[in-house]
Amino acid sequence: MLPLESHKLLSAKLLQLLLLLYCTIGRSQDQNTYEVLTIAFYNTENLFDTRNDDFTFDDDRTPEGKDAWTEEKYHQKLNNIAKVISEIGIELSRNSPEIIGLCEIENYSVLEDLLNTTKLISKDYKIIHFDSPDRRGIDNALVYNPNIFKPIASKAIAVPIQNGDGKRRYTRDILVSTGTIQNEKFAFLVNHWPSRSGGEKASRNYRKSAALVNRKICDSLWAIDPSLKIINMGDFNDDPKNKNVKNILKTSENPNQFQFYNPMLKLYKKGIGSLAYRDNWNLFDQILVSGAMLNKDYKNFQYYKAGVFKKEYLITSKGQYKGYPFRSYGYNGYLGGYSDHFPVYLYLIKTKNPR
C-alpha cells in the first residue's frame, strides 16, 4: 500500500491531468464552434524587382543603383515577406490570412514572384492589382484565397491632388474590390495615402483629399447596397485619432451601418504602433470595419479582435534603433530585414452551426 503522501501526490497529478484534458477538449470544442477568417494589411517597404522601369523612379532599386539591389537581395526580401504573411493569424485561425492588402509593391510581376515563394506557393492565392500613377512606382494590391473570397468587380480609383502651384501631384490609387464570402457581400478598400513628407501639417490636406475620395467610394457603395460590409484598410499615414481618419471616414465606438469601427484606436491609446520615427510610435497601418460587422450573434461573419503582428524576428534587436521594425534598408545601407512597418490584422468569426 502506498504511503499517504504518495496517494496525495498521485491524486494531485491525476487532478492536473484531468484539468488539462478538460481544458484541451474545451478549447477544441470552442475552436470547432467558430469559423475564423484573418484579414491582414502589410506595407512591404519598397518591394521592387531588379529591372529598371523607364517610367518610374526605381533607379535606386537596380543592381547598378544606389541600393545595389541584386537578385540575391530581391529574393531574400521576397522570402522574408512571404514568411511574415504565412504566419499572420495562425495562433487563432491555424492558417495564413484569407485576405491580405499590400502596399509599396512595384508591379504585378513582383506579386507573382512573392506568391511563388516556398512559404506561399501552396496557398494558391490570387491577385488583384492595378498600376498606379505614383512616380515612385509603388502600387496597392489585394491578395486573396479564392476558396473564401469570390470577387465580382474591382477597380482603382484615382486620388486627385494638386501642389501649391496648381500642378497635379500623383499618388497611389485606392483599390476597391467587391465580392462575396459565403454569400455575404463584402467590399475591400486598400489605401496608401500621401506621406508626411514636409511635415504633418504641410501635408495634411493631401491626405484629406484621399480621405474624401475614400468616403465618397463608401457612400457610393452603400447607396447601391446598404447591407454591404466594408473593410477599409491601408497605410493612412495618419493615426486613428487624426481628423482625416476619425471625422472624414466617420469612425465611432458605436457605429451605425454607414460608419466604421476602428479597432486600432484602442491599440494606439495603449501606445502600440506599427512604425516608429524619432522614438515616437505611430499606428498608420489600420483596418476599419463597417458597423454591420459588430453584431454579437455571429450568425454571419463579425469582427472579433485585431492586433499588430510583431514577432521577435521582425524587431531590431540592437543598436540605435533597437525595438524598431527590422527593415530592409536603413541609414547604414542594406540590413536584410523585412519592412519599416509591422503588419496589422483582424479576425472575423462566424458560428459554424448557428442555432
Image (cartoon, rainbow, N blue to C red):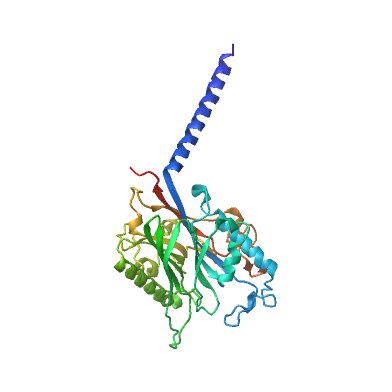
Q: Residue 323 in the image: state x and y as whole percent.
A: 58, 58
Compare residues 337 and 135 and report the one nearer the observer: 135
Compare residues 103 and 323 and report the one nearer the observer: 103
Residue 293 found in image quarter: bottom left
Q: Is residue 105 above or below residue 292?
A: below
Q: Residue 235 in the image: state x and y as whole percent.
A: 48, 67
Q: Is residue 28 above or below residue 145?
A: above
Residue 127 in sight in this render: yes
Q: In the visual, does 77 lie left or right of 306?
A: right
Task: Check the picture and name the quadrant holding the N terminus.
Answer: top right
Residue 314 in sight in this render: no
Compare residues 66 and 85 and report the one nearer the observer: 85
Q: Residue 113 in the image: state x and y as whole percent.
A: 61, 66
Task: Check the picture and name the quadrant holding the C terminus.
Answer: top left
Outermost residue on the top side: it is: 1
Q: In the visual, does 322 lie left or right of 207?
A: right
Q: Residue 264 in the image: state x and y as whole percent.
A: 43, 59
| Residue drawn at the location 45% of the way across and 77% of the way down | 203
